[in-house]
């Protein structure tokens, strides 16, 4: 006899992991969504105040910034699961890869398109600041609050020497 899908004990909401258990996703949500909101607004305002080429330059710089920083977050997150020294070296390599990608994109924009390179650069930096701010907010929201629940009843193991003196200052 098969069980009806609506009578199962685990619902779709309870089967889904909590977003706080996936900090990279939370950090990307808090950084990509604001930049996807800010980028078109900056591009439209620039286009209205100047011309279409300048507005397109702003949009290209914004998209480039979002791609470079989002790929960096994903790459660094993958590296953090390894040993400490390797993670630091890998993070340094990701930084240089981001710089190389950005430089290559700027050279391509400068040589092969009618876009304004300075405007692309300014847009890249402004959207990057919004992205990094959102990343910091996402990282802070992903933190798990530590409490003493479970310590008193013995369900959580304490790694503290019981005989050590505690100074209360």
Image: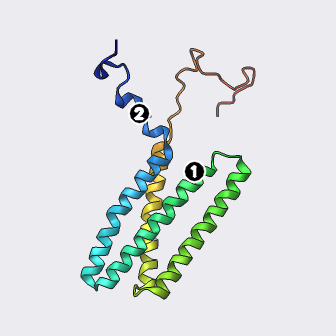
Q: Is residue 29 above or below residue 57?
A: above
Which percent across, then down, holds residue 125? 46, 72
Q: Is residue 162 left or right of residue 106?
A: right
Name the quadrant containing residue 31.
bottom left
Name the quadrant containing residue 43.
bottom left
Q: Which mark is residue 49?
A: none
Q: Is residue 145 above or below residue 89?
A: above
Report the residue at 36% width, 56% height from top: 33
Distance from Cα at disc 1 to Cα at disc 2:
21 Å
Q: Which mark is residue 16?
A: 2
Which percent across, then down, holds residue 64? 45, 70
Q: Is residue 62 above or below residue 159?
A: below
Report the residue at 56% width, 77% height from top: 103
Q: Residue furthest front?
A: 1
Q: Which mark is residue 77?
A: 1
Identify the element where label 2 is drawn: loop
Q: Residue furthest top?
A: 1
Q: For mark 2, does the 10 Å Cα neighbourhood hold few (<14), some (14 to 19), or many (20 or more) residues?
A: few
Q: Is residue 19 left or right of residue 104?
A: left
Say which label, 1 or 2, has the lower sequence index. Answer: 2
Which percent across, then down, holds residue 112? 46, 86
Which percent across, then down, holds residue 75? 57, 56
Q: Depth check: 111 or 156 in front? A: 111
Q: Is residue 69 left or right of residue 1?
A: right
Query: How many numbered circles does the render carry?
Result: 2
Identify the element where label 1 is drawn: helix
Quadrant in which the C terminus appears? top right
Report the residue at 69% width, 27% height from top: 166
């Amino acid at each position: 006899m098969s069980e009806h899908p609506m009578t199962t004990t685990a619902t779709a909401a309870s089967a889904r992991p909590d977003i706080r258990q996936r900090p990279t996703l939370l950090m990307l949500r808090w950084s990509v969504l604001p930049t996807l909101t800010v980028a078109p607004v900056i591009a439209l305002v620039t286009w209205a105040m100047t011309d279409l080429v300048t507005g397109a330059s702003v949009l290209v710089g914004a998209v480039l910034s979002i791609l470079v920083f989002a790929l960096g977050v994903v790459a660094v997150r993958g590296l953090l699961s390894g040993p400490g020294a390797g993670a630091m070296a890998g993070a340094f390599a990701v930084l240089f890869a981001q710089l190389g990608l950005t430089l290559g994109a700027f050279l391509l924009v400068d040589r092969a398109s009618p876009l304004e390179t300075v405007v692309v650069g300014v847009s890249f930096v402004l959207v990057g600041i919004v992205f990094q701010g959102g990343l910091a907010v996402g990282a802070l929201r992903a933190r798990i609050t530590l409490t003493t629940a479970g310590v008193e009843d013995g369900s959580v193991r304490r790694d503290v020497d019981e005989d050590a003196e505690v100074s209360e200052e």
